[in-house]
Amino acid sequence: MLASRLVKRFKCAAPAVKSGRNAKTLRTAPAPSARPTVVSRSFLGSDLIRGRTNSNQEFAENPKGVPSSQYHRTSTRYTNTTPELLQILSAKDSIPHREPQGLMDGLVNRIVRFLRVASDAYFKDDLIYRAMMLETVAAVPGMVGGMMHHLRSLRRVENDNWIRTLLDEAENERIHLFCWLDVLRPTWSQKWLIISVQAVFFTGFLGAYILFPKSCHRFVGYLEEEAFKTYTHLLEYIDSGKIKDRPAPKLAIDYWNMPEGSTMRDMTVIIREDEADHARVNHSMANMITSLRKRDMVYTDITIDDSVFETVPGTHIVPGGTVEAISKAAKQNEKKL
Ligand SMILES: [Fe+2]
Ligand SMILES: [Fe+2]
């Protein structure tokens, strides 16, 4: 009875498409030929009134739906993704990296390097499958950290400005996951793998966060650096034709406010940039814990704000944390001013 209910729960609607190494196991969702308007339940009632949608045909087939593109919009800095900004971010060739300092940093870095080698061996060239699996676990640390800080704040009756940042990170990763789910649907056996990995990772990370919060943020920082590399490889594969480009999911276009007609490549560019931000924030948090310890770990008045980010060349941050591309004309005007 329980088994049949679970099988029913994980049954996938998308047809199987045979291609590549994992032809027998992967189910690739067909590229959308049109984007019909489907009114879906939204956290914002105004969406319903305007008849807006955060769903496309593929997701409409999935009764569980997709996250609202409006809800937790602040979980990304890239809420005004112009073609110009995409061009600038796409041309970025430097990979963010922080050199390990000290014994624990070195150990954490080695663990991440080991996970990288193991992932390379398991996924090989299936980079979209890899991205999807990566995002299923990437949303765990932010939620664990957010939960721990939330409970700490309640317990100590102290304000804690890290909670929102960590929960935003978790939400941002969840949006990444749903964007990849539009491209690739996991089979029920892959969902079991996801559940198993999450169960182990959540338990392990929670235990580690209770004991070594600083090293956990450092671990996430290095993990995000690897995610940046993975997405850089994916971009190379798309550019060389090894992976066929396709229209970006409607969710991605709405969430990052991307230009109509954006592709999976554009989506990859912007996800990669989110990962770079996660790396910077988590490394910053690890650094801050060192200084906070000297003040009895008081998180009051400590905010991860835009000052911890390096502004991407050719862009600037406007109030609200939005990143905008600076056009040549605007640059010249700014110089005149
Ligand atoms: Fe991600
Ligand atoms: Fe990330």
Image: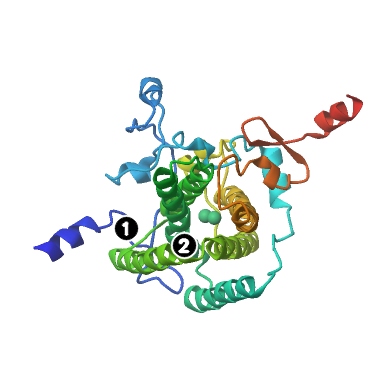
Q: Which residue is mark 2?
A: 209
- Res 277 visible: yes
Q: Which mark is residue 15?
A: 1
Indicate the secondary structure of the residue bearing disc 1. loop
Q: Residues within 10 Å of mark 2 (few under 14, many from 20)?
A: some
Residue type of the residue flagged with mark 1: Pro
What residue is shown at x 67% (from left), y 39% (from top)?
83
Comes first in the chain, label 1 or label 2: 1
Q: Which mark is residue 173?
A: none
The image shows residue 268, relative to residue 242, as above or below, that is above
Which of 70 and 63 lies nearest the eye of the viewer? Answer: 70
Judge left or right: residue 115 versus residue 225. left
Q: Residues within 10 Å of mark 1 (few under 14, many from 20)?
A: few
The quadrant the C terminus occupies is top right
Give residue 325's quadrant in the image: top right
Quick check: which quadrant has ligand 2? bottom right
Give residue 187's quadrant in the image: bottom left
Residue type of the residue flagged with mark 2: Tyr
**Residue 179: x and y, percent?**
46, 49
| Residue extending farthest left | 1
What residue is shown at x 70% (from left), y 61% (from top)?
95
**Residue 19: x and y, percent?**
43, 68
Which of 318 and 11 lies nearest the eye of the viewer? Answer: 318
